[in-house]
Every structure is written in structure tokens, then in C-alpha cells.
Amino acid sequence: MGMQAQPQGHDGGRLLSLAPLTALELDPAELVSCAAATGFDAVGLRLIRATGQEPVRPTIGLTPLIRETKRRLDDSGLQLLDIEVVRLVPDTDVRPDFEGFLETGAYLGAAEVLVTGYDPDHVRTADNLAQLSLLAAEFGLTINLEPMPWTEVRNLHEGAALVAQCPVTVGLLIDAIHYDRAGSTPAELRALPRDWIRYAQICDAPTERPTSVAELMYQGRSARLLPGEGGIDLVSMLRALPTGLPISVEAPLLGDAPAAVRAAAAARASREVLASVDDSGWTPLIRTA
């Protein structure tokens, strides 16, 4: 099977998307407006909470919030790159748990679905991943498994072993901080089938890796750095991935700067890094007041 054509940004270059974790205080409609105002081509939306500390929002089904989100997507011209976050756990029942979520994503125009693995039984995870991939295909969506060091799918090796068992194409989502903290390499990325890699997430982090799971989780969820401001070799990572791959910027930062300020800084920093990759002909975004 050939590599899928990559979606493009407004300028004909690489698609740049704002991930919800970068501005988690915003609801989906607000995040769409923020992405449109700060130089992004696309957005990702969190329709299922990742933790119990996140606000409960009416994000499944044709709720007023979802209809408003759809209106803002249509008005802005932004693409909806992905929806999140599916957590595969020991008692997952795929269709009852996620059909409404997938149907909502399809209504909004999503392309990709972010999935994480929290089940130590990888045989059961593989079965649930296969079921989920078939269910998502009914809605024109593709699922993407994201390895994270503190989950039960810890690294590229474990993620690839599960993706290889799926009956339809499933993505393997590369997140820069998890890739780095797991000790993965560009050579490992180049060895993966190209059609497994549908988009990637970027951020940065301090060179020194955390020494505890608690610190890994805190840094990953709340204290990353803007691309190019830390010790992750993003250029080598991105050069090992398919040319022109859509990029989601997932960079939750410490501090109390407004969401729009953080998002604009993330867009500028990301485009500067992508220009260094030299596979798209981009120059850094220059924004005037």
C-alpha cells in the first residue's frame, strides 16, 4: 500500500495543528477560535477527558457545544486533525464505550483518533485495538496508538507490535517527549512502515530525563517546553519521519500566560523548527502586532 497524500497547510506547506493539551483550559469551540487566531492550519479536540482532574464538558453527541464547535470549524476553514483521547483499559467494551465519540468526531470532520494503552494484557489490547480500528473505519476515521513511558504501551517497540496485528491500517503516533524519554532513535523511526506514520506531535523538554514515573507524568502533562527551547533533537526525529507529515504542537507550559499568547508562541517556535528540517520549503512565521 502506498503512502497516503499528506494534507497541507494554508500556504501549501506542512499542516500545523494546535493540540488541546497546549491550552487545556479552553473548551473545544474556544480552542478552534484560538487556533485560527494564532497561525495554525488545524486543531485537535479533546472529547474524552484523559484524567479526572479535567473539566467535564458536553462533548459527545450533537450538544450545543459540539454544534458551536462545528460552526467555528466551518467558519475558520481549519481542519480537524484529530480527536482524543481513547484509553484502552482492561474492561474496555469498544462499541458501547466509543461509538458515540467516533460519531461525534465524524460529524466535526476529524481525520485521526488518538489512542493510549492502559491494559497490561497486550493480547487483550491487540484485540481491542483491532475492534476499534474497524469501528473507526465505519466513520471514516483512522486510529493512532501513542506509546508513552508511563502507560502499558511504553515505547515504539511495544506500539509497533500491537499495530502490526490490526486488520486495517492503524497509525503509530510519535510524540517527541515520549520518543525522547523512552530512549528511541531516528533509526527506529526509519525502520517503521511509512503508512503507519500519519502525523506526529512536537514539543521540547530539558535534556536531563526525569528519574521517576511521577516526574515523567508531571513533565509530560504540565511542564514541557516550546519546540527548539530544550534538549530534544527534533530535527533528527522529524527527518526520520515521512516528508511533509502533519504536525500537532502539544506543548503545555508552566506559567500563567493567556492561552492565545502560549498558542502563538507555539506556532512561531514550531515553524522555526520545521524550517530547519528543510523538507517543506517553509520559512518561520513572522507575525506583526
Image (cartoon, rainbow, N blue to C red):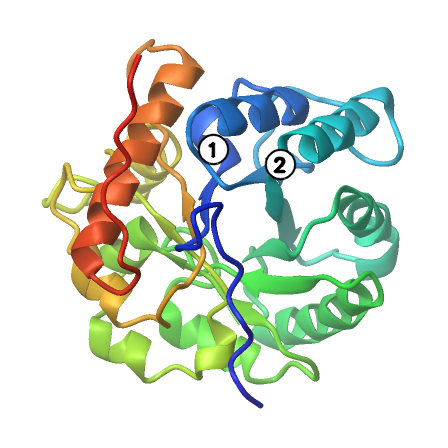
Residue ID at (35%, 39%) = 220
Asked whether the viewer can see residue 212, the reply is no
> Do the residues bearing badges 2 and 1 touch, measured as CB atoms within 8 Å?
yes
Amino acid on which disc 2 is placed: Arg
x, y percentage for residue 257? 33, 11
Figure quadrant of the C terminus: top left
Which residue sits at x=78%, y=23%?
68
Please report the residue visible at 67 percent of the width from the left and 23 percent of the height from the top.
29
Query: Where does residue 119 sit, x and y in percent of width and height?
Result: 59, 60
**Vertical position of residue 223 compared to residue 78: above or below:** above
Q: Is residue 282 above or below residue 70?
A: below
Residue 14 on image: x %, y %:
40, 55
Is 234 above or below relative to 29? below
Real-space CA distance between mark 2 and mark 1, rounded to the nearest whole angstrom: 8 Å
Nearer to the camera, 176 or 261: 261
Q: Which quadrant holds residue 143?
A: bottom right
The residue furthest bottom is 1
- The kind of residue tagged 1 is Leu
Q: Which residue is mark 1?
A: 21
Left or right relative to 42: residue 244: left
Disc 2 is placed on an element classified as strand
Q: Residues within 10 Å of mark 2 (few under 14, many from 20)?
A: many
Q: Position of residue 109 (x, y in %)?
A: 74, 48
Instruction: Name the mark on residue 192.
Output: none
> Is disc 1 surrounded by few (<14), some (14 to 19) or many (20+) residues within 10 Å?
some
| Closest to the observer, 109 or 191 | 109
- Residue 46 numbered tag: 2
Please give left or right for residue 227 compared with residue 11 in the image.
left
Image quadrant holding the N terminus, namely bottom right
Left or right: 265 with respect to 159? left
Hey, which quadrant is residue 251 in on the image?
A: top left
